[in-house]
Image: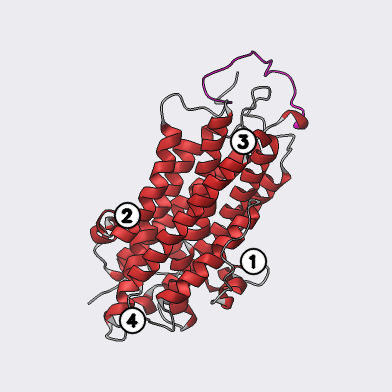
Amino acid sequence: MSCCNVSDQRPEAHDLTKRVNAEDKRLINCKAVDVNQLMPIKYDWAWEHYLNGCKNQWMPNEVPMQKDIELWKSNKLTAAERSVIMRNLGFFSTAESLVGNNIVLAIFKHVTNPECRQYLLRQSFEEAIHTHTFHYICESLNLDEREIFNMYHEVSSIRNKDEFEMRLTEDIMQEGFSTDTTEGVQTFLKNLIGFYVIMEGIFFYSGFVMILSFHRGNRMTGIGEQFQYIMRDETIHMNFGLDLINGIKAENPEAWTPKFQKEIDGLIEEAVELEVAYAQDCLPRGILGLNAGMFREYVQYIADRRLERIGLTAKYGDSNPFPWMSETIDLAKEKNFFETRVIEYQTGGALTWD
């Protein structure tokens, strides 16, 4: 018996009832190993990412929102500050769903390694938690949920980023797609890079800076704390994705051609411009010591780091205008977020607005 070892195409038969040898496992196109057998583990990094994700379990309604509600109801936030918060809620509310759907619909069945699938299951759950977060925030602040969740159709700077990602999902969803060819492996790598390197590694980071800038000023601290949790999860997601991408490259070196590398470089360059346009849309005027020019530097700095992690050459040469973000992202230096968890709390729906 086997379940979803590969796509439906099986050029040769293998005895999947034999005991598994770890050295026979492969990240994709593994037809010789029963994908239902987790042990013995070959890719220790995948299991470590899974365990780290489990250690970080949290729920949005464990974070108190009363101070955010009081500030949101007051006149202490400018129209520009409110717009920045709303724009970022609008982007993240559906971006998390796009990532989750891409895992379930496009990535999962083509990854033929059980320890990687174990992590993908964990990540899918975390994406659902992140989407739940924006439901909780909307409910707590009494926001128009239809406005927030439909922004990716109504706001062009959000729509352009999401359409960029959805094209990559559609490529994998084409009837008959498989990773059995070099071209198929390249298309799959493009999807992984699009979501793990670009979406979770570039597109999310301007929003993290904007929201955490409020938090650093002790404002909108409930939203800020939830974004800290999300960023911690996303750091692990991205690192898993980078390990998966680099592992597939190592097992399929014929796919990582100079021409394909140039194509990936071009994708990341396009993504940088989309993210800079998003930051400019969010910050037409400077607030909280932030301005759109700083975000071009930051996005290009982040893009260089991502290029290097997949074996490509850094191209921008910018420095980090937000050095405090490096410390926030460094998991070894982060505070124990769970110190702020509350045992007894009111959910957003129970909080009084009168």
Query: Label 3: which residue?
Result: 255
Q: Earlier in the sequence, mark 4 or mark 2?
A: 4
Q: How is the image coloured?
A: secondary structure
The answer to whether 123 is drawn above or below residue 336 in the figure is: above
Q: Is residue 123 visible?
A: no
Camera-side residue: 280 or 332? 280
Please determine whether, in this image, residue 252 is positioned above or below residue 244. Answer: above
Q: Which residue is mark 4?
A: 71
Which of labels 1 and 3 is toward the front?
3
Q: Chief secondary structure of the magenta span?
A: loop
Q: Earlier in the sequence, mark 4 or mark 3?
A: 4
Decide whether residue 117 is among the magenta residues.
no
Q: Residues within 10 Å of mark 2 (few under 14, many from 20)?
A: some
Residue range highlighted in magenta: 5-22
| Residue matched to label 2 | 159
**Residue where numbered disc 1 is placed:** 331
Question: SS of the residue at dot 2?
Answer: helix
